[in-house]
Image (cartoon, grey):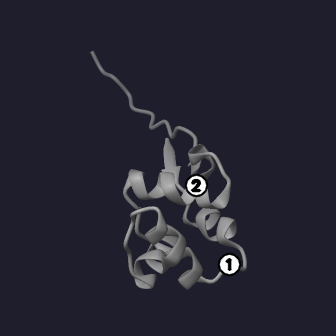
Amino acid sequence: MIKFSHRRLKEARGTIRVTDIQYLLKTRGVEVTTASIYSWETGQVPKINILAVLAEIYGKPIEYFFEDMGTTRVGCAVSK
């Protein structure tokens, strides 16, 4: 199972101020609030087009922001 990683998004930003990210997004045609950026780092998932722009800004491939959580198998008995 592939899952969006809020942690990786926050790590990619590093010490860059959220207002600077907001400005860089705006220069690329994406207008968002700083609250939106914080929410993506703590629980919400950005739209894929916004994530693509963030990946460009952070110099990361878009795949960087996803983690493989592995597959969980649930056993079940089949009776005949």
Answer yes or no: is residue 25 visible. Answer: yes
Label whose residue precedes the other's in the sequence (1 or 2) = 1
Which secondary structure lies at badge 1? loop
Write down the residue under mark 1.
Answer: 16
User: Residue placed at 66% from the left, 51% from the top?
Assistant: 60
Answer yes or no: is residue 68 visible. Answer: no
What amino acid is labelled 2 in the image?
A: Ala
User: Residue placed at 40% from the left, 77% from the top?
Assistant: 36
Q: Is residue 15 above or below residue 25?
A: below
Q: Residue furthest front?
A: 27
How many residues crowd around disc 2 within 10 Å: few (fewer than 14), some, or many (20 or more)? some
Figure quadrant of residue 55: bottom right
Q: Is residue 69 above or below residue 28?
A: above
Figure quadrant of residue 80: top left
How many residues crowd around disc 1 within 10 Å: few (fewer than 14), some, or many (20 or more)? few
Q: Residue furthest right?
A: 15
Q: What is the C-alpha distance between the residues marked 1 and 2? A: 14 Å
Q: Residue furthest left?
A: 80
User: Residue placed at 51% from the left, 43% from the top?
Assistant: 2
Write down the residue under mark 2.
Answer: 55
Give the label on residue 75, or none.
none
Residue 4 x/y as whole percent: 50, 55
Residue 45 x/y as whole percent: 41, 62
Q: Is residue 4 above or below residue 16?
A: above
What amino acid is labelled 1 in the image?
A: Ile
Residue 21 x/y as whole percent: 56, 74
Which secondary structure lies at badge 2? helix
Residue nearest the observer in this picture, 14 or 78: 14
Residue nearest the observer in this picture, 53 or 12: 53
Residue 25 x/y as whole percent: 48, 68
